[in-house]
Amino acid sequence: MPTHWYQGRVTNIQKLSATTRQFTIQIENEDSIFDFLPGQFITMDLPVSEKRLHRWRSYSIANHPDRSNVLEFCIVKSEDGLGTKYLFEEVEVDTLIKFKGPDGGFVLPQNLQQESIMICTGTGVAPFRSMIKYIRQQSLNFQKIHLIFGTRNAEGILYKDEFMQFAEENPNFIYDVALSREQHSAYHYGYIHDIYKQKYAEVIPNRHFYICGWSKMIDDVVANLLVNMGYDKSQIHYELYG
Ligand SMILES: Cc1cc2nc3c(=O)[nH]c(=O)nc-3n(C[C@H](O)[C@H](O)[C@H](O)COP(=O)(O)OP(=O)(O)OC[C@H]3O[C@@H](n4cnc5c(N)ncnc54)[C@H](O)[C@@H]3O)c2cc1C
Protein backbone atom coordinates (compact mmCIF):
# COMPACT_ATOMS: atom_id res chain seq x y z
CA MET A 1 0.00 0.00 0.00
CA PRO A 2 1.39 3.45 -0.84
CA THR A 3 2.34 5.59 2.12
CA HIS A 4 -0.41 7.92 3.23
CA TRP A 5 0.91 11.40 3.96
CA TYR A 6 -1.08 13.63 6.27
CA GLN A 7 -1.08 17.37 6.42
CA GLY A 8 -1.09 19.09 9.79
CA ARG A 9 -1.47 22.77 10.53
CA VAL A 10 0.55 24.12 13.44
CA THR A 11 -1.95 25.66 15.85
CA ASN A 12 0.28 26.39 18.83
CA ILE A 13 3.95 26.60 19.75
CA GLN A 14 4.79 26.66 23.41
CA LYS A 15 8.17 27.16 24.99
CA LEU A 16 8.77 24.39 27.55
CA SER A 17 12.38 25.24 28.39
CA ALA A 18 15.25 27.25 26.92
CA THR A 19 15.83 24.60 24.24
CA THR A 20 12.51 22.75 24.07
CA ARG A 21 9.18 23.57 22.49
CA GLN A 22 5.85 21.88 22.24
CA PHE A 23 4.33 22.01 18.77
CA THR A 24 0.61 21.36 18.43
CA ILE A 25 -0.66 20.21 15.07
CA GLN A 26 -4.23 19.87 13.84
CA ILE A 27 -4.60 17.29 11.08
CA GLU A 28 -6.35 18.75 8.04
CA ASN A 29 -8.49 17.31 5.26
CA GLU A 30 -9.09 13.94 6.87
CA ASP A 31 -12.51 12.37 7.27
CA SER A 32 -11.12 9.61 9.43
CA ILE A 33 -9.66 9.66 12.90
CA PHE A 34 -5.88 9.53 13.12
CA ASP A 35 -5.57 6.73 15.63
CA PHE A 36 -2.39 5.71 17.37
CA LEU A 37 -1.16 3.83 20.40
CA PRO A 38 0.28 5.81 23.30
CA GLY A 39 4.06 5.84 22.75
CA GLN A 40 4.08 5.74 18.94
CA PHE A 41 5.79 8.28 16.68
CA ILE A 42 5.22 9.95 13.33
CA THR A 43 7.73 10.98 10.67
CA MET A 44 7.70 14.52 9.32
CA ASP A 45 8.84 15.45 5.84
CA LEU A 46 10.54 18.80 6.49
CA PRO A 47 11.63 21.04 3.59
CA VAL A 48 15.32 20.96 4.52
CA SER A 49 16.82 19.03 1.61
CA GLU A 50 16.22 18.14 -2.01
CA LYS A 51 16.70 14.50 -1.11
CA ARG A 52 13.58 12.84 0.23
CA LEU A 53 15.21 10.64 2.87
CA HIS A 54 17.29 13.56 4.16
CA ARG A 55 14.11 15.45 4.93
CA TRP A 56 12.53 12.89 7.23
CA ARG A 57 12.57 13.36 10.99
CA SER A 58 10.67 11.21 13.48
CA TYR A 59 8.94 12.57 16.58
CA SER A 60 7.09 10.77 19.36
CA ILE A 61 3.50 11.85 19.84
CA ALA A 62 3.45 13.48 23.27
CA ASN A 63 -0.31 13.53 23.83
CA HIS A 64 -2.68 10.59 24.12
CA PRO A 65 -5.11 9.34 21.46
CA ASP A 66 -8.44 11.12 21.98
CA ARG A 67 -9.96 11.10 18.47
CA SER A 68 -9.40 14.86 18.14
CA ASN A 69 -6.86 14.71 15.28
CA VAL A 70 -4.72 17.06 17.34
CA LEU A 71 -1.15 15.96 18.00
CA GLU A 72 1.46 17.39 20.34
CA PHE A 73 5.22 17.07 19.97
CA CYS A 74 7.91 17.90 22.45
CA ILE A 75 11.05 18.77 20.51
CA VAL A 76 14.51 19.90 21.56
CA LYS A 77 16.60 22.15 19.33
CA SER A 78 19.73 20.25 18.44
CA GLU A 79 22.95 22.14 17.76
CA ASP A 80 23.45 22.48 14.00
CA GLY A 81 20.51 20.17 13.35
CA LEU A 82 18.81 20.91 10.05
CA GLY A 83 15.36 19.68 10.97
CA THR A 84 15.12 21.43 14.31
CA LYS A 85 16.62 24.60 12.84
CA TYR A 86 13.66 24.59 10.50
CA LEU A 87 11.15 23.76 13.26
CA PHE A 88 12.50 26.41 15.64
CA GLU A 89 13.31 29.19 13.17
CA GLU A 90 10.85 28.84 10.29
CA VAL A 91 7.77 27.11 11.62
CA GLU A 92 5.07 29.34 13.07
CA VAL A 93 1.36 29.09 13.80
CA ASP A 94 -0.41 28.14 10.52
CA THR A 95 2.64 26.46 8.96
CA LEU A 96 1.66 23.19 7.27
CA ILE A 97 3.64 20.06 8.10
CA LYS A 98 3.54 16.86 6.08
CA PHE A 99 3.89 13.64 8.03
CA LYS A 100 3.30 9.90 7.91
CA GLY A 101 2.59 7.33 10.57
CA PRO A 102 1.90 6.35 13.23
CA ASP A 103 4.72 3.86 13.67
CA GLY A 104 6.58 2.04 16.37
CA GLY A 105 6.21 -0.73 18.88
CA PHE A 106 7.35 1.23 21.93
CA VAL A 107 3.87 1.48 23.35
CA LEU A 108 1.96 1.33 26.59
CA PRO A 109 2.44 -2.15 28.05
CA GLN A 110 -0.66 -4.31 27.67
CA ASN A 111 -0.13 -5.77 31.08
CA LEU A 112 -0.20 -2.99 33.62
CA GLN A 113 -0.24 -5.50 36.47
CA GLN A 114 3.53 -5.41 36.46
CA GLU A 115 6.00 -2.81 37.63
CA SER A 116 6.75 -0.42 34.78
CA ILE A 117 9.87 1.67 35.28
CA MET A 118 10.03 4.48 32.71
CA ILE A 119 13.43 6.10 32.30
CA CYS A 120 14.16 9.12 30.11
CA THR A 121 16.15 12.29 29.68
CA GLY A 122 14.89 15.49 28.05
CA THR A 123 12.37 15.06 25.26
CA GLY A 124 12.60 11.29 25.71
CA VAL A 125 9.72 11.95 28.10
CA ALA A 126 7.34 12.41 25.13
CA PRO A 127 6.09 8.81 24.73
CA PHE A 128 5.74 8.44 28.50
CA ARG A 129 3.63 11.59 28.66
CA SER A 130 1.35 10.04 26.04
CA MET A 131 1.11 6.77 27.98
CA ILE A 132 0.51 8.44 31.32
CA LYS A 133 -2.09 10.87 29.95
CA TYR A 134 -3.87 7.90 28.40
CA ILE A 135 -3.84 5.90 31.65
CA ARG A 136 -5.18 8.92 33.49
CA GLN A 137 -7.87 9.71 30.95
CA GLN A 138 -9.05 6.08 30.80
CA SER A 139 -8.69 5.61 34.57
CA LEU A 140 -6.72 2.42 33.91
CA ASN A 141 -5.60 0.36 36.87
CA PHE A 142 -1.90 -0.28 37.16
CA GLN A 143 0.28 -1.95 39.72
CA LYS A 144 3.14 0.54 39.73
CA ILE A 145 4.63 3.07 37.34
CA HIS A 146 7.83 4.87 38.23
CA LEU A 147 8.85 7.73 35.92
CA ILE A 148 12.48 8.71 36.25
CA PHE A 149 13.27 11.91 34.35
CA GLY A 150 16.74 13.37 33.96
CA THR A 151 17.94 16.76 32.82
CA ARG A 152 20.71 19.21 33.66
CA ASN A 153 18.88 21.81 35.73
CA ALA A 154 15.42 22.63 37.05
CA GLU A 155 14.66 24.89 34.09
CA GLY A 156 14.75 21.83 31.83
CA ILE A 157 12.16 19.75 33.67
CA LEU A 158 9.36 18.98 31.20
CA TYR A 159 5.67 18.63 32.14
CA LYS A 160 6.52 18.69 35.85
CA ASP A 161 3.11 19.96 36.99
CA GLU A 162 1.23 17.25 35.10
CA PHE A 163 3.35 14.46 36.52
CA MET A 164 3.29 15.86 40.03
CA GLN A 165 -0.46 16.15 39.91
CA PHE A 166 -0.82 12.55 38.74
CA ALA A 167 1.55 11.42 41.52
CA GLU A 168 -0.64 13.23 44.05
CA GLU A 169 -3.77 11.60 42.66
CA ASN A 170 -2.33 8.12 42.39
CA PRO A 171 0.00 6.57 44.96
CA ASN A 172 1.00 3.87 42.46
CA PHE A 173 2.64 6.50 40.25
CA ILE A 174 6.07 7.60 41.42
CA TYR A 175 7.80 10.58 39.85
CA ASP A 176 11.50 11.26 40.34
CA VAL A 177 13.63 13.94 38.74
CA ALA A 178 17.42 13.82 38.59
CA LEU A 179 19.31 17.05 37.94
CA SER A 180 22.90 16.53 36.89
CA ARG A 181 24.11 20.14 37.08
CA GLU A 182 22.04 21.84 39.77
CA GLN A 183 21.44 21.10 43.41
CA HIS A 184 17.81 21.54 44.36
CA SER A 185 16.04 20.42 47.51
CA ALA A 186 13.08 18.89 45.63
CA TYR A 187 15.12 16.76 43.24
CA HIS A 188 17.84 14.18 43.18
CA TYR A 189 21.25 15.69 42.43
CA GLY A 190 23.03 13.41 39.98
CA TYR A 191 22.09 11.07 37.18
CA ILE A 192 19.02 8.93 36.50
CA HIS A 193 21.26 5.89 36.93
CA ASP A 194 21.64 6.50 40.65
CA ILE A 195 17.88 6.19 41.13
CA TYR A 196 17.03 2.91 39.39
CA LYS A 197 20.30 1.29 40.49
CA GLN A 198 19.49 1.99 44.09
CA LYS A 199 15.72 1.23 44.00
CA TYR A 200 15.73 -1.84 41.78
CA ALA A 201 18.93 -3.61 42.81
CA GLU A 202 16.87 -6.67 43.70
CA VAL A 203 15.79 -8.38 40.47
CA ILE A 204 12.19 -9.56 40.23
CA PRO A 205 10.54 -11.05 37.11
CA ASN A 206 7.41 -8.90 37.18
CA ARG A 207 9.29 -5.66 36.49
CA HIS A 208 9.86 -4.07 33.10
CA PHE A 209 12.02 -1.12 32.14
CA TYR A 210 11.06 1.31 29.37
CA ILE A 211 13.80 3.69 28.27
CA CYS A 212 13.62 6.54 25.79
CA GLY A 213 16.17 9.05 24.53
CA TRP A 214 19.58 9.20 22.92
CA SER A 215 22.06 6.37 22.48
CA LYS A 216 24.59 7.24 25.18
CA MET A 217 21.95 7.23 27.92
CA ILE A 218 20.16 4.15 26.60
CA ASP A 219 23.42 2.21 26.21
CA ASP A 220 24.38 3.03 29.79
CA VAL A 221 20.98 2.06 31.23
CA VAL A 222 20.82 -1.19 29.26
CA ALA A 223 24.39 -2.13 30.26
CA ASN A 224 23.64 -1.42 33.91
CA LEU A 225 20.40 -3.42 33.92
CA LEU A 226 21.69 -6.37 31.91
CA VAL A 227 25.30 -6.73 32.89
CA ASN A 228 25.67 -5.13 36.29
CA MET A 229 22.26 -5.77 37.81
CA GLY A 230 21.26 -9.07 36.18
CA TYR A 231 17.92 -8.26 34.53
CA ASP A 232 16.82 -10.35 31.57
CA LYS A 233 16.73 -8.66 28.17
CA SER A 234 13.01 -9.49 27.88
CA GLN A 235 12.46 -7.02 30.72
CA ILE A 236 14.10 -4.11 28.87
CA HIS A 237 12.37 -2.07 26.15
CA TYR A 238 13.64 1.11 24.54
CA GLU A 239 13.05 3.79 21.94
CA LEU A 240 16.22 5.23 20.45
CA TYR A 241 16.09 8.86 19.25
CA GLY A 242 19.55 8.83 17.63
C1 LIG B 1 11.48 7.12 16.75
C2 LIG B 1 12.06 8.49 17.02
C3 LIG B 1 11.34 9.39 17.79
C4 LIG B 1 11.88 10.65 18.06
N1 LIG B 1 11.16 11.51 18.84
C5 LIG B 1 11.71 12.69 19.18
C6 LIG B 1 10.96 13.59 20.05
O1 LIG B 1 9.83 13.31 20.46
N2 LIG B 1 11.55 14.76 20.37
C7 LIG B 1 12.82 15.11 19.92
O2 LIG B 1 13.30 16.19 20.28
N3 LIG B 1 13.52 14.27 19.08
C8 LIG B 1 12.98 13.10 18.70
N4 LIG B 1 13.68 12.27 17.84
C9 LIG B 1 14.94 12.76 17.22
C10 LIG B 1 14.59 13.48 15.90
O3 LIG B 1 14.08 12.57 14.94
C11 LIG B 1 15.79 14.19 15.24
O4 LIG B 1 16.85 13.26 15.10
C12 LIG B 1 16.27 15.36 16.07
O5 LIG B 1 15.20 16.31 16.19
C13 LIG B 1 17.47 16.04 15.40
O6 LIG B 1 17.11 16.42 14.11
P1 LIG B 1 17.86 17.57 13.33
O7 LIG B 1 17.39 17.56 11.94
O8 LIG B 1 17.80 18.86 14.07
O9 LIG B 1 19.37 17.08 13.39
P2 LIG B 1 20.25 16.53 12.18
O10 LIG B 1 21.56 16.19 12.80
O11 LIG B 1 20.24 17.47 11.02
O12 LIG B 1 19.53 15.22 11.72
C14 LIG B 1 19.27 14.17 12.58
C15 LIG B 1 19.04 12.88 11.77
O13 LIG B 1 18.46 13.14 10.50
C16 LIG B 1 19.00 12.30 9.53
N5 LIG B 1 19.80 13.08 8.54
C17 LIG B 1 20.12 14.37 8.63
N6 LIG B 1 20.86 14.73 7.56
C18 LIG B 1 21.01 13.64 6.80
C19 LIG B 1 21.68 13.37 5.59
N7 LIG B 1 22.38 14.29 4.95
N8 LIG B 1 21.64 12.12 5.11
C20 LIG B 1 20.95 11.16 5.74
N9 LIG B 1 20.27 11.34 6.90
C21 LIG B 1 20.33 12.57 7.41
C22 LIG B 1 19.86 11.34 10.26
O14 LIG B 1 19.10 10.24 10.65
C23 LIG B 1 20.30 12.14 11.45
O15 LIG B 1 20.71 11.37 12.55
C24 LIG B 1 13.17 11.01 17.56
C25 LIG B 1 13.88 10.09 16.77
C26 LIG B 1 13.33 8.86 16.51
C27 LIG B 1 14.13 7.89 15.67
Image (cartoon, grey):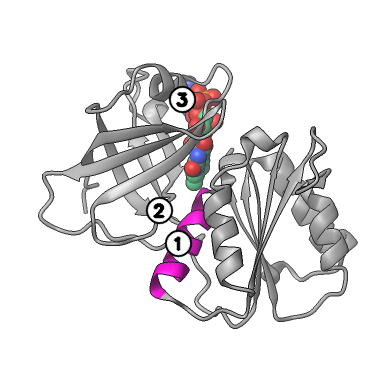
Q: How crowded is mark 1: few (under 14 residues within 10 Å), some or many (20 or more)?
A: many
- The mark nearer the N terminus, 1 or 2, is 2
Kindly report the secondary structure that dominates the magenta region of the rendered protein: helix
Please name whichever residue, 214 or 182, is drawn nearer the observer in this view of the structure: 182
Magenta region: 126-138
**Residue topped by disc 3:** 84
Image side of residue 82 versus residue 239, left or right: left
Rendered view: 213 above or below 162:
above
Residue 234's disc number: none
Q: What residue type is labelled 3?
A: Thr
Observer-nearest of 210 and 64: 64
Say which element carries label 1.
helix
User: Residue 241, percent across and down?
Assistant: 56, 42
Give the secondary structure at mark 2. loop
Which residue is drawn at the image coordinates 57% and 43% (left, top)?
Answer: 158
Give the CA distance from mark 2 to mark 3. Answer: 20 Å
Q: Name the residue under label 2.
A: 63
Q: Above or below — where is 54 with respect to 149?
A: above
Q: Is mark 3 within 8 Å of ligand 1?
A: yes
In what element is the residue under mark 3? helix
Task: Provide residue 211's location: percent of width, then percent of height.
Answer: 64, 55
Badge 3 or badge 1: first in the primary sequence: 3
